[in-house]
Amino acid sequence: MSTFLSVPPPGLTGPTRCLVVDDDAMVRQTLRRVLQSQDMEVLDAPDGERALAILERDGTIPLVLTDVYMPGMDGLTLVREIRARYPDTAILVITGVADVATAVESFQLGALDYLSKPVLMDEVRQRVQNALDKRRLMLENRWLQEDQQGRLERQLQVLMRRNEEMFLGQIQMAVRMLEAKDGYTLGHSRRVSFYSVRIAEELGIGGSDLDQIRLGGELHDIGKIGTRDAVLNKPGTLTREEFDEVKQHVIDGEEMLEPLRVDHPSVLEIVRWHHEHLDGSGFPDGLVGTAIPLPARIVSAADAFDAMTTDRAYRPPRTPREANAELDRCAGNQFDGEVIAAFHRAFPDVTRLPRE
Ligand SMILES: [Fe+2]
């Protein structure tokens, strides 16, 4: 399995360290010699407490060999403690020759193998090597699974991003179709997006919040794709039914953009609430004041300014100065005063706005 790995999983590099725990100094000495002959770095402790202190000081040690019967903390308690605190440590238990019950219990507690006393050099070597191989396989296996999981997650994210890009591409195409259908609004979405971003920047908004305002400004009227041309382009005053149809565009737009809700919730808020007024007289929900999310309050002002300064089927355009004055007049009741102030800071000379 390791031949497939370009990078070894953590915990498998460097010299193998080993901790021998036995109250019998002779046994510790024998085991130390055997293990050193296997190129291992050997630490030892006469009881469980001191073994845990060494582990605490040194962190994970790949292999622990422990006696069972020791004064103080016994070997089985030590096995339990090590399993709980250092799950990547392999444990070999050293039992008396005929002590099968203890061997079974140690397996149940998570020991990998056991050695019988008196310890025989060749047997120790073999068991130690087996235990280390088993530990390595378990770590590699876990590492591979985690690596594979990570790869799958990354692929999924790429797919989701691609999906979103495709969706946004379609939606942006729909915006262009909408503007082509209503000749008076050519470039409106792009300008609203531009004004909104500048206002937002003046208000200290950045990062993903700013991106959502940019997108929300561009898509704010997407729901008008469902509004009849006769209503959109009607030169005169709209009947009540026709106005209701126009009002529907904020609801339809929000529905169309549902796939963006998780990652771009502000975009949906902008689409739904860009016709709300601060005093509660707007639509569709009659929200009041700060109940209208700030991104929607920003796009509302940008939208109104651009609508006023653009030629429409039902009226000639106002000059930028007149539109500016109208924003000021309606600040506090229709528009957020701070948003209008930010608009003025962003565009101190409205006669020199970039136009298409
Ligand atoms: Fe709108």
Image (spheres, grey):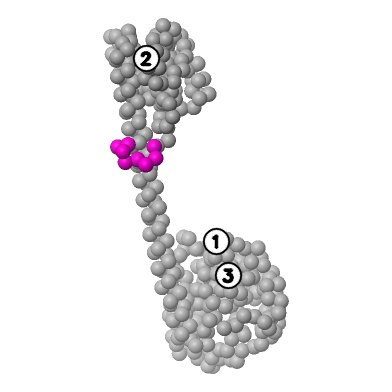
Q: Nearer the viewer, residue 163 or 20?
A: 20
Label 2 element class: helix
Discs 1/3, front:
1
State the mark number for residue 34: 2
Q: Position of residue 59 (x, y in %)?
A: 49, 27
Q: Residues within 10 Å of mark 3 (few under 14, many from 20)?
A: many
Mark-to-mark CA distance, 2 and 3: 75 Å
| Extreme-bottom residue of the structure | 236
* Tag 1 residue: 208
Q: Main secondary structure of the magenta part?
A: loop
Label 1 element class: helix
Q: Nearer the viewer, residue 196 or 224?
A: 196
Discs 2/3, front:
2
Magenta stretch encompasses residue 306 = no
Up the image or down, 246 lies above or below 27; here it is: below
Mark-to-mark CA distance, 1 and 3: 15 Å
Up the image or down, 302 lies above or below 241; here it is: above
Residue segment shown in magenta: 1-8
Under mark 3, the amino acid is Ala
State the mark number for residue 124: none
> Sequence-wise, which precedes: disc 2 or disc 3?
2
Identify the residue at horizontal 66%, vertical 87% (top origin): 319
* Tag 3 residue: 296
Contact between marks 1 and 3 (CB within 8 A): the answer is: no
Under mark 2, the amino acid is Val
> Sequence-wise, which precedes: disc 1 or disc 3?
1
Q: Is the C-beta of the residue carrying label 2 under 8 Å from the nearest atom of ligand 1?
A: no
Under mark 1, the amino acid is Ser
In the shown orientation, is residue 254 left or right of residue 301?
left
